[in-house]
Image: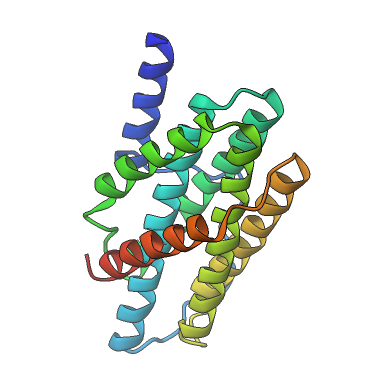
Amino acid sequence: MLDRFIIEFDKGLRTLFAPAASVRPLPGAQLDEAALSDPEKKLAAALMRVNHSGEICAQALYQGQALTARNPTAKAALAQAAQEETEHLNWCETRIRALGSHTSYLNPLWYTGSLAIGALAGALGDKWNLGFLAETEHQVERHLAGHLERLPMADAKSRAIVTQMQQDEARHATTALEQGGVTLPLPIQQGMQLTSKIMTQAAYWV
């Protein structure tokens, strides 16, 4: 148990403070940088900062869930999702830096809260654990669709990243349901939406 705690603590430090790595190439890397106005750059950077914070939350959720998951299949699904979320972290941070901005200063807060929620979800049992994963990904997928509507049309680089992220999240949700995840009760879904709204509004600015 102590070894697992040390490993997860190390993962947390790496998630928050170390550059994330990506096996896959950066989506849109081959595209030319658009000549964006200052307001467009500011908007794109803020939206990508929100996406980055969302991926911080996802990392913490999956790590918390994996700590308490019982079924090896569930753990494998969580591990695969976490790996791709790490790539999303890399992509978002790369784009934020290219736009001349910064990641959210509140990321340690998002991480800590999400880790606790993930551990609780995992402790409820694997069908609820996987259901929580599926609902999280469904909400993130809808959130990313909204960002595609708000991002400047000329910012093809940011749009390419968000599009690939959206495809990954949809696949994670499908996999979780195929592995036995259940649909969460409506009050839980609404609570998740409220928490997500608070995080996105705060991360947009700081």
Q: Is residue 95 above or below residue 168?
A: below
Q: Quadrant of residue 75?
A: top right
Q: Nearer the viewer, residue 203 or 176?
A: 176
Where the N terminus falls, by quadrant? top left
Q: Is residue 67 above or below residue 187?
A: above
Q: Can the viewer see residue 29 in this picture? A: no
Which residue: 34% across, 80% down? 43
Query: In x, y percent, where is residue 42?
Result: 30, 79
Query: In x, y percent, where is residue 191?
Result: 42, 59
Q: Is residue 55 left or right of residue 136?
A: left
Which residue: 65% across, 56% down? 168
Q: Can the viewer see residue 136 in this picture? A: yes
Residue farthest toward the top in the current orientation of the protein = 2
Q: Quadrant of residue 5?
A: top left
Q: Nearer the viewer, residue 137 or 28?
A: 137
Q: Nearer the viewer, residue 66 or 41?
A: 66
Which residue: 72% across, 48% down? 177
Coloured how? rainbow
Q: Is residue 184 above or below residue 128?
A: below
Q: Is residue 97 left or right of residue 1?
A: left
Which residue: 75% across, 39% down? 179
